[in-house]
Image (cartoon, rainbow, N blue to C red):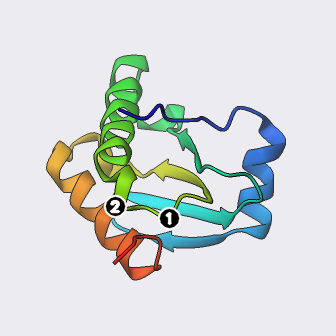
């Protein structure tokens, strides 16, 4: 199993928001941009407006798991920030995973 490399710096998130492309769904918003490094990186944002720490952590875990399961079919040189929307709190794991796959396919981020 390959380790997920995280985006940690605030400037990296801001760079993706400003210069990256976006795909909007009912449950999540995906910002992405090609990077010069060899591997892709992932950042996850869940606002405090969505709930307390337990709720936010659950949404974060679900998104990370979806990325892990589909990571082999994603393009390797993409930096990505996934922002959870309000409906993601009540959504099932499979719903979030399906929406991410649809958005990634629509934007051409998945290998065919």
| Location of mark 2 (residue) | 100
Residue 86, position in %: x, y?
Answer: 38, 49
Residue visible at 33% across and 78% down in the picture: 112
Q: Secondary structure at mark 1?
A: loop
Query: To which quarter of the image does residue 26 belong?
Result: bottom left
Image depth: mark 2 or mark 1 in front? 1
Q: How many discs appear?
A: 2
Q: Is residue 92 above or below residue 79?
A: above
Give the left or right position of residue 60, taking residue 36 as reference.
left
| Location of mark 1 (residue) | 75
Residue visible at 30% across and 72% down in the picture: 102
In-front residue for pair 66/71: 71
Query: To which quarter of the image does residue 58 belong?
Result: top left
Q: Is residue 63 above or below residue 75?
A: above
Q: Secondary structure at mark 2?
A: helix
Q: Is residue 111 above or below residue 82?
A: below
Residue 98, position in %: x, y?
Answer: 22, 61
Mark positioned earlier in the residue sequence (2 or 1)? 1
Residue 30, position in %: x, y?
Answer: 51, 61
């Amino acid at each position: 199993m390959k380790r997920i490399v995280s985006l940690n710096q605030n400037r990296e998130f801001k760079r993706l928001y400003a210069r990256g492309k976006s795909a909007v769904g009912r449950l999540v918003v995906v910002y992405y941009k090609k990077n010069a490094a060899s591997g892709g990186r992932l950042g996850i944002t869940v606002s405090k407006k969505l709930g307390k720490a337990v709720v936010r952590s659950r949404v974060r875990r679900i998104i990370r798991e979806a990325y892990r399961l589909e990571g082999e079919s994603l393009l390797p040189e993409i930096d990505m920030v996934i922002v959870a929307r309000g409906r993601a709190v009540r959504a099932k794991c499979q719903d979030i995973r399906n929406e991410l796959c649809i958005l990634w396919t629509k934007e051409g981020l998945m290998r065919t």
